[in-house]
Image (cartoon, rainbow, N blue to C red):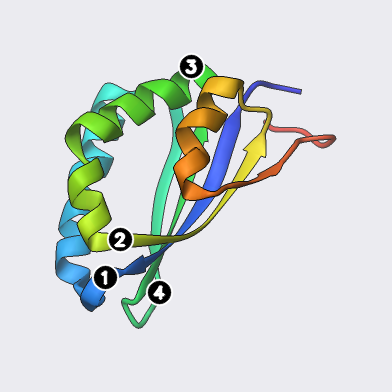
């Protein structure tokens, strides 16, 4: 097994403002790609009707999650919460207690990795 931590965050787009939602997404993707080398996957997916978004995120380990959380908190959290409304967060892997504490406001469901492989 590896130490990767990943999740699927399901969101509603507040007031259906898809253009603002996508502008913020572009800014966040660019910053994450440029500043967080241990973010392994950061994929945003929007529904055809523009009402919902799923973000798949995968990190090398819990330390990488905490780097992302700090960047998110400092640069994006306030604006994010005016555009997106979290509906569900499912976390995969075995995150440490710091990650669990940081994700607690989202009411996550934890699924521990018990088998399989990653290439």
Whether tag 4 and tag 2 are in contact, CB under 8 A, the answer is: no
Q: Position of residue 15 (x, y in %)?
A: 22, 76
The residue beneath circle 2 is 84
Question: Dot 3: few (<14), some (14–19), or many (≥20) neighbours within 10 Å?
Answer: some
Left or right: where does residue 15 sit relative to residue 53? left
Left or right: where does residue 53 sit relative to residue 117? left
**Of the residues under marks 4 and 3, which one precedes in the sequence?**
4
Q: Which mark is residue 14?
A: 1
**Of the residues under marks 4 and 2, which one precedes in the sequence?**
4
Q: Residue at x 45, y 44 (%)?
A: 105
48 in relation to 54, above or below = below
Q: Position of residue 92 (x, y in %)?
A: 65, 40
57 in relation to 11, above or below = above
Whether tag 2 and tag 1 are in contact, CB under 8 A, the answer is: yes
Question: Dot 2: few (<14), some (14–19), or many (≥20) neighbours within 10 Å?
Answer: many
The residue beneath circle 3 is 63
**Of the residues under marks 3 and 1, which one precedes in the sequence?**
1
SS state under label 2: strand
Q: Quadrant of the N terminus?
A: top right
Q: In this rendering, which labeled residue sits more in front, label 4 or label 2?
A: 2
Whether tag 3 and tag 1 are in contact, CB under 8 A, the answer is: no
Q: Position of residue 24 (x, y in %)?
A: 19, 52
Q: CA distance from mark 4 to mark 2?
A: 13 Å
Q: Which mark is residue 47?
A: 4
Left or right: where does residue 73 sit relative to residue 96? left
Is residue 52 at all visible to an observer of this figure? yes
**Of the residues under marks 4 and 1, which one precedes in the sequence?**
1
Q: Residue at x 42, y 22 (%)?
A: 66
Q: Residue at x 21, y 30 (%)?
A: 74
């Amino acid at each position: 097994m590896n130490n990767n931590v990943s999740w699927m965050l399901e969101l509603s787009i507040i007031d259906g403002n898809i253009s603002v939602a996508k502008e913020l997404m572009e800014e966040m993707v660019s910053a994450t790609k440029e500043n967080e080398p241990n973010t392994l996957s950061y994929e945003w997916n929007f529904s055809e009707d523009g009402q919902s978004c799923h973000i798949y995120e995968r990190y090398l380990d819990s330390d990488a999650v905490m780097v992302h959380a700090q960047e998110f908190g400092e640069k994006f959290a306030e604006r994010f919460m005016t555009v997106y409304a979290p509906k569900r967060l499912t976390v995969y892997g075995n995150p440490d207690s710091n990650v669990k504490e940081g994700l607690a406001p989202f009411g996550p469901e934890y699924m521990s990795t018990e088998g399989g492989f990653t290439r």
